[in-house]
Protein backbone atom coordinates (compact mmCIF):
# COMPACT_ATOMS: atom_id res chain seq x y z
CA UNK A 1 0.00 0.00 0.00
CA UNK A 2 1.35 3.44 -0.88
CA UNK A 3 1.27 5.59 2.24
CA UNK A 4 3.25 8.55 3.44
CA UNK A 5 6.78 7.47 4.23
CA UNK A 6 6.57 4.26 2.20
CA UNK A 7 9.82 3.39 0.38
CA UNK A 8 8.10 3.28 -3.04
CA UNK A 9 6.43 6.67 -2.61
CA UNK A 10 9.64 8.30 -1.40
CA UNK A 11 11.41 7.25 -4.62
CA UNK A 12 8.93 9.16 -6.79
CA UNK A 13 9.18 12.82 -7.65
CA UNK A 14 6.76 15.09 -5.78
CA UNK A 15 4.50 15.44 -8.87
CA UNK A 16 4.50 11.68 -9.50
CA UNK A 17 3.70 11.00 -5.84
CA UNK A 18 0.73 13.40 -5.91
CA UNK A 19 -0.47 11.90 -9.18
CA UNK A 20 -0.13 8.37 -7.76
CA UNK A 21 -2.11 9.32 -4.64
CA UNK A 22 -4.89 10.83 -6.79
CA UNK A 23 -5.06 7.75 -9.01
CA UNK A 24 -5.19 5.44 -5.98
CA UNK A 25 -7.85 7.58 -4.33
CA UNK A 26 -10.01 7.56 -7.49
CA UNK A 27 -9.52 3.81 -7.91
CA UNK A 28 -10.52 3.14 -4.29
CA UNK A 29 -13.67 5.25 -4.67
CA UNK A 30 -14.60 3.32 -7.82
CA UNK A 31 -13.85 -0.01 -6.14
CA UNK A 32 -15.95 0.87 -3.09
CA UNK A 33 -18.94 2.03 -5.11
CA UNK A 34 -21.55 -0.66 -4.65
CA UNK A 35 -23.58 0.11 -7.76
CA UNK A 36 -22.48 -0.86 -11.24
CA UNK A 37 -22.44 1.83 -13.91
CA UNK A 38 -25.49 0.52 -15.72
CA UNK A 39 -28.69 2.33 -16.38
CA UNK A 40 -32.17 0.86 -16.32
CA UNK A 41 -33.70 1.10 -19.80
CA UNK A 42 -36.10 4.02 -20.04
CA UNK A 43 -39.83 3.34 -20.50
CA UNK A 44 -41.97 5.64 -22.64
CA UNK A 45 -45.57 5.85 -23.76
CA UNK A 46 -44.44 6.27 -27.38
CA UNK A 47 -41.00 5.62 -28.84
CA UNK A 48 -40.25 6.84 -32.36
CA UNK A 49 -37.20 4.89 -33.55
CA UNK A 50 -34.63 5.78 -36.20
CA UNK A 51 -36.25 8.78 -37.86
CA UNK A 52 -34.48 11.65 -39.60
CA UNK A 53 -35.23 14.32 -37.01
CA UNK A 54 -35.55 17.97 -37.93
CA UNK A 55 -35.40 19.82 -34.62
CA UNK A 56 -36.31 23.31 -35.96
CA UNK A 57 -32.85 24.69 -35.11
CA UNK A 58 -31.94 25.12 -38.79
CA UNK A 59 -29.35 22.34 -38.60
CA UNK A 60 -29.44 19.38 -40.99
CA UNK A 61 -31.47 16.38 -39.87
CA UNK A 62 -29.99 13.86 -37.49
CA UNK A 63 -30.78 10.18 -37.04
CA UNK A 64 -32.39 9.82 -33.61
CA UNK A 65 -35.03 8.17 -31.48
CA UNK A 66 -37.67 10.21 -29.67
CA UNK A 67 -39.19 9.20 -26.33
CA UNK A 68 -42.63 10.55 -25.44
CA UNK A 69 -44.18 10.32 -21.99
CA UNK A 70 -47.36 12.02 -20.84
CA UNK A 71 -47.87 13.63 -24.25
CA UNK A 72 -44.49 15.40 -24.13
CA UNK A 73 -41.12 14.70 -25.71
CA UNK A 74 -38.86 13.77 -22.80
CA UNK A 75 -35.79 12.31 -24.59
CA UNK A 76 -34.16 12.49 -27.98
CA UNK A 77 -31.05 10.71 -29.21
CA UNK A 78 -29.87 7.11 -29.38
CA UNK A 79 -32.26 5.53 -26.86
CA UNK A 80 -30.85 2.02 -27.26
CA UNK A 81 -32.73 -0.51 -25.12
CA UNK A 82 -35.61 1.80 -24.21
CA UNK A 83 -39.10 0.33 -24.31
CA UNK A 84 -42.55 1.81 -24.88
CA UNK A 85 -46.22 0.93 -24.97
CA UNK A 86 -46.18 1.93 -28.65
CA UNK A 87 -43.10 1.85 -30.88
CA UNK A 88 -43.12 3.61 -34.25
CA UNK A 89 -40.49 2.57 -36.80
CA UNK A 90 -39.51 5.82 -38.53
CA UNK A 91 -36.49 4.49 -40.48
CA UNK A 92 -36.41 6.30 -43.84
CA UNK A 93 -38.96 8.87 -42.62
CA UNK A 94 -38.60 12.47 -41.50
CA UNK A 95 -39.79 13.49 -38.03
CA UNK A 96 -40.33 17.18 -37.33
CA UNK A 97 -42.22 19.47 -34.98
CA UNK A 98 -45.62 20.67 -36.15
CA UNK A 99 -45.84 23.51 -38.62
CA UNK A 100 -47.63 26.81 -38.04
CA UNK A 101 -49.91 28.33 -40.69
CA UNK A 102 -49.87 32.01 -39.75
CA UNK A 103 -52.33 33.00 -42.48
CA UNK A 104 -55.09 30.41 -42.26
CA UNK A 105 -58.61 30.71 -43.58
CA UNK A 106 -59.67 27.60 -41.64
CA UNK A 107 -61.78 29.22 -38.89
CA UNK A 108 -65.07 28.49 -40.63
CA UNK A 109 -64.17 24.83 -41.23
CA UNK A 110 -62.93 24.39 -37.66
CA UNK A 111 -66.24 25.84 -36.43
CA UNK A 112 -68.16 23.25 -38.49
CA UNK A 113 -67.80 19.75 -39.80
CA UNK A 114 -64.01 19.97 -40.21
CA UNK A 115 -63.38 20.70 -36.51
CA UNK A 116 -60.91 17.83 -36.14
CA UNK A 117 -58.56 19.57 -38.57
CA UNK A 118 -57.52 16.31 -40.22
CA UNK A 119 -56.79 18.06 -43.51
CA UNK A 120 -54.38 20.37 -41.66
CA UNK A 121 -52.75 17.66 -39.55
CA UNK A 122 -52.22 15.55 -42.68
CA UNK A 123 -49.98 18.38 -43.94
CA UNK A 124 -48.09 18.57 -40.62
CA UNK A 125 -49.85 21.78 -39.56
CA UNK A 126 -50.54 21.77 -35.83
CA UNK A 127 -51.22 25.49 -35.23
CA UNK A 128 -53.24 27.97 -37.29
CA UNK A 129 -53.58 31.73 -37.08
CA UNK A 130 -57.21 32.39 -38.05
CA UNK A 131 -59.17 35.44 -39.23
CA UNK A 132 -56.53 36.96 -41.53
CA UNK A 133 -57.27 39.89 -43.82
CA UNK A 134 -59.98 41.18 -41.49
CA UNK A 135 -62.12 38.11 -42.16
CA UNK A 136 -63.78 35.96 -39.56
CA UNK A 137 -65.62 36.85 -36.42
CA UNK A 138 -65.05 40.19 -34.74
CA UNK A 139 -66.20 38.62 -31.46
CA UNK A 140 -63.07 36.65 -30.63
CA UNK A 141 -64.30 35.70 -27.16
CA UNK A 142 -67.37 33.93 -28.61
CA UNK A 143 -65.28 32.33 -31.35
CA UNK A 144 -62.81 30.99 -28.78
CA UNK A 145 -65.60 29.69 -26.53
CA UNK A 146 -67.09 27.85 -29.52
CA UNK A 147 -63.75 26.22 -30.38
CA UNK A 148 -63.26 25.18 -26.75
CA UNK A 149 -66.81 23.83 -26.41
CA UNK A 150 -66.75 21.77 -29.63
CA UNK A 151 -63.11 20.80 -29.37
CA UNK A 152 -60.79 21.11 -32.36
CA UNK A 153 -57.87 19.10 -33.65
CA UNK A 154 -55.28 21.89 -33.93
CA UNK A 155 -54.04 24.83 -31.89
CA UNK A 156 -55.59 28.20 -32.81
CA UNK A 157 -54.14 31.67 -32.50
Image: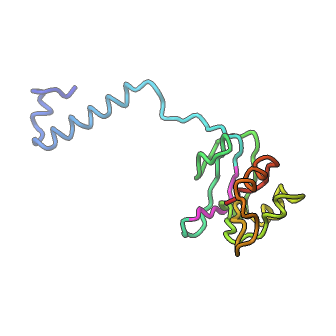
Farthest residue toward the right?
113
Q: Please give left or right for residue 19 compared with residue 37 in the image.
A: left
Give percent across and percent down for residue 66.
Answer: 64, 51
Viewer-closest of 9 and 40: 40
Residue at left 82%, top 49%?
150
Give percent across and percent down for residue 27.
Answer: 32, 33
| Quarter of the view holding residue 15 | top left
| Quarter of the view holding residue 155 | bottom right
Viewer-closest of 80 and 109: 109
Give percent across and percent down for residue 26.
Answer: 30, 34
What range of the chain is rendered magenta? 48-56
Give percent across and percent down for residue 59.
Answer: 54, 69
Asked which colour scheme the image uses, the reply is: rainbow
Farthest residue toward the front?
139
Residue at left 75%, top 64%?
137
Q: Residue 55 colored magenta?
A: yes
Residue at left 59%, top 51%?
76
The quadrant of the rendering that contains the C terminus is bottom right
- Seen in the picture, residue 120 relative to 69 is either above or below; the reply is below
The quadrant of the rendering that contains the N terminus is top left
Picture mark count: 0
Amino acid sequence: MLLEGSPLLSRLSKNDAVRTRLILFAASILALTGRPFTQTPARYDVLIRGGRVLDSSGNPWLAADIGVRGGRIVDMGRLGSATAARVIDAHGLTVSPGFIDVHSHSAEGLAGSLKEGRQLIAQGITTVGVNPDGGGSADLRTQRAGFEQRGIGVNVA
